[in-house]
């Protein structure tokens, strides 16, 4: 009987010991998270976040191409059919290509967007051409029936918007 | 002067939260007259998911998506059920007041932690509604689908696959279709939830759409609190509530613009809500906890495919321990929606990612090496990435406590999470895909569940499972002693709530 009681007491003590170690872990983790969260909270510029319109923040985010899309989102007619001519030379061409495609299809939706990597003959259904090239690449030959609507020049790229005449 | 749009957003997201809470509370009240606190904690998530599914049904029935069509049915239901709903809300409010009064007795450390938790939540909210939308998957997939759904007023994925990649006649240098990259087979609920925000405010507001994550962080905190406070005491539960809102993986998901707008954190919180209810159900809680464990697991499965495994596990456990509940309307509806999605995706041929990319004959030679590589890479990530290291340590401590302890209440949660991790490992061993880039997201998914697991593992088993009552926190002892002798502990506000019922 005494042995069983001693065994039970020993078991309880070991369990308490384990729980104590686990609690130390929890408190150390909490202090670590406290430091991390403290960094986040103290580095946050609340006043700036409160004062800048989300649309303005979006318009200034990303590279020149992304910023141009925000401008076009607000100005291109909703029914436009857009051909994106992606001529940027990036270190990861596939990633860059899909970036170009997804960003255009997202920001310009519900306008339909197709993509090509070289400027060639343009299908008659397109109303807008969006030429994106690295700085230093030759300018696009303006296809017949189109004229340059706007050109946005950034340090690493040039985005040219061409609109079909009378579109 | 603060920007008007920001101020409106700061009102709009809490208003969206209030609508979700109302819908979720109506539904939980239909499930149980007095649902357990842990079930009530998930009500906003239940409401948000229900609004998303409601839009899906509206799209099928060609009912327009706008604030009136979305909210009116719930206002009518709330009017019909006004007395029990009022009683439920009064009871919830009284619970909150009790917690608020008790918080005054917390020590300085706990008060600092509680205050920082509140500031963090506000910071997340502010960042969600002001930071630009820049995440790759958010733009290519989750928010793109939300935009398409809202503007076409339906779950219109067929049109996405058909969106042109190349000019007709041009093959292009990259031979992957946009439909595949956009993962059309991924479940639609997260995008539908974002679309429900658009429907309520009457237009596409990209940054405001990210506000749905605010629901998740509140539900995570409330679920951890209601699960752990009764067994750990308020001070320790407060620390766990802080952890579930503040650990770096959560900061990444809610504060880093390139990582916000993804479904992983939502999935983690839906799994947390399911696990918390499962744990209560397993420990002899109300029958509604079984039902809600299945409902939240269904929400997880509708947020991302990774949630399917948990749903299967919870269903199996329910079939074993509470078979009669599988025929309840809530369970049938939840499983029906998940099945409807799986059937829809299969019918449209959206099964973009196959589980098995190798031929069966090559598997014996490929799998062992791949398994070793993935295991080695996982170990390397755990060692080198501080965020993951803490989570791995939390899991290790939990396993140690559960395996060495007797009758731990955390056992079932440990089993569920471990099976989830084994499934991740098995899936990536069969099809490595983008494993290297996905570990961060898996860590985000696992974070809420791991925090709950550690809290449960540390808890001394409840009086019902034989542990001396004196081991429990002081504020819990009285309740447990009363339960042991068959006396129900109720407070005055609860009595008032019952009178109204």
Image: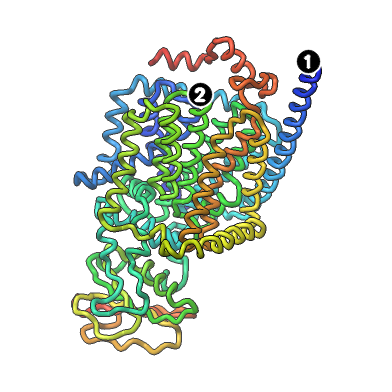
Tell me: residue B185, above or below residue B460. Answer: below
User: Which residue shows up at 78% across the image and 26% down it?
Assistant: A10
Q: Which mark is residue B250?
A: none
Q: Position of residue B438 (x, y in %)?
A: 51, 59
Disc 1 crowd rating (10 Å Cα; few below 14, some 14-19, many 20+) is few
Q: B208 or B73: nearer the eye? A: B73
| Letter of the chain that mark 2 sits on in the rendering | B
User: Which residue shows up at 27% across the image and 73% down it?
Assistant: A82
Q: B368 or A147: nearer the eye? A: B368
Tell me: residue B17, above or below residue B4. Answer: above
| Letter of the chain that mark 1 sits on in the rendering | A
Marks 1/2: CA distance? 33 Å
Q: B446 or B351: nearer the eye? A: B351
Tell me: residue B86, above or below residue A167. Answer: above
Tell me: residue B453, above or below residue B463. Answer: below
**Res B343 seen here:** yes
Q: Position of residue B90 (x, y in %)?
A: 44, 22
Residue, disc 1 = A1
Q: Which mark is residue B284?
A: 2
> Could you say which quadrant of the image residue B63 lies in?
top left
Q: How is the image coloured?
A: rainbow
User: Which residue shows up at 30% across the image and 31% down it?
Assistant: B75
* Position of residue B284 in the picture relative to residue B382 (left or right): left
Q: Position of residue B408 (x, y in %)?
A: 61, 30
User: Which residue shows up at 53% across the image and 43% down it?
Assistant: B417
């Amino acid at each position: 009987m005494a042995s069983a009681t001693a065994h039970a007491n020993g078991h309880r003590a070991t369990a308490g010991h384990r729980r104590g170690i686990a609690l130390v872990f929890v408190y150390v983790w909490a202090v670590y998270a406290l430091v991390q969260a403290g960094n986040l909270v103290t580095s946050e510029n609340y006043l700036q976040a409160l004062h800048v319109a989300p649309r303005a923040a979006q318009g200034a985010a990303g590279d020149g191409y992304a910023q141009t899309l925000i401008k076009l989102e607000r100005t291109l007619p909703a029914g436009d059919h857009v051909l994106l001519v992606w001529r940027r030379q990036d270190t990861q061409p596939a990633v860059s290509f899909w970036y170009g495609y997804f960003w255009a299809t997202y920001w310009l939706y519900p306008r339909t967007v197709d993509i090509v990597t070289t400027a060639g003959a343009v299908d008659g259904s397109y109303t807008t051409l969006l030429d994106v090239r690295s700085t230093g690449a030759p300018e696009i030959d303006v296809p017949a029936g189109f004229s340059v609507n706007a050109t946005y020049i950034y340090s690493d790229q040039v985005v040219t918007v061409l609109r079909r005449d009378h579109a | 002067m603060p920007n008007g749009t920001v101020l409106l957003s700061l009102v709009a997201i809490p208003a969206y939260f209030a609508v979700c809470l109302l819908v979720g509370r109506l539904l939980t009240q239909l499930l149980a007259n007095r649902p357990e606190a842990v079930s009530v904690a998930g009500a906003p998530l239940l409401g948000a998911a229900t609004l998303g599914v409601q839009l899906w049904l509206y799209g099928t029935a060609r009912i327009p998506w706008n604030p009136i069509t979305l909210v009116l049915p719930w206002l009518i239901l709330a009017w019909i059920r006004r007395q029990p709903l009022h009683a439920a809300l009064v009871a919830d409010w009284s619970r909150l007041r009790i917690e608020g009064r008790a918080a005054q007795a917390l020590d300085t450390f706990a008060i600092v932690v509680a205050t920082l938790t509140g500031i963090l939540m506000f910071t997340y909210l502010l960042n969600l509604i002001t930071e630009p939308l820049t995440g790759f998957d958010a733009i290519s997939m989750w928010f793109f689908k939300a935009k398409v759904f809202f503007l076409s007023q339906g779950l219109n994925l067929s049109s996405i696959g058909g969106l042109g990649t190349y000019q007709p006649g041009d093959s292009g240098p990259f031979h992957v279709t946009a439909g595949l990259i956009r993962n059309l087979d991924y479940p639609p609920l997260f995008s539908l939830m974002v679309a429900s925000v658009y429907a309520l405010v009457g237009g596409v507001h990209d940054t405001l759409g990210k506000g749905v994550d605010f629901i998740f962080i509140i539900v995570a905190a409330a679920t951890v609190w209601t699960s752990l406070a009764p067994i750990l005491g308020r001070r320790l539960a407060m620390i766990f509530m802080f952890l579930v809102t503040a650990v770096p993986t959560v900061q990444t998901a809610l504060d880093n613009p390139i990582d916000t707008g993804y479904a992983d954190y939502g999935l983690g919180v839906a799994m947390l809500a399911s696990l918390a209810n499962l744990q209560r159900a397993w420990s002899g809680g109300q029958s509604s906890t079984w039902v809600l464990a299945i409902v939240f697991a269904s929400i997880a499965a509708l947020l991302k495919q990774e949630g399917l495994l948990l749903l299967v596990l919870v269903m199996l456990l329910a079939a074993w321990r509470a078979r009669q509940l599988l025929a309840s309307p809530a369970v049938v509806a939840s499983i029906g929606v998940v099945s409807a999605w799986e059937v829809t995706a299969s019918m449209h041929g959206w099964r973009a990612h196959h589980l098995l990319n190798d031929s069966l004959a090559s598997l014996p030679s490929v799998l062992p090496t791949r398994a070793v590589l993935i295991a080695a890479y996982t170990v390397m990530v755990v060692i080198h990435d501080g965020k993951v290291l803490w989570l791995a340590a939390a899991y290790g401590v939990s396993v140690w406590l559960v395996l060495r302890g007797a009758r731990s209440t955390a056992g079932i949660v440990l089993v569920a999470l471990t099976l989830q991790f084994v499934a991740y490992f098995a899936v990536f061993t069969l099809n490595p895909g983008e494993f290297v880039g996905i570990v961060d997201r898996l860590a985000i998914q696992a974070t809420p569940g791991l925090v709950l697991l550690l809290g449960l593992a540390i808890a001394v088993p409840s009086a019902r499972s034989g542990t001396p009552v004196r081991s429990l926190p002081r504020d819990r002892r009285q309740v447990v002693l009363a339960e042991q002798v068959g006396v129900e502990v109720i407070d005055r506000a609860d009595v008032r709530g019952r009178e109204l019922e």
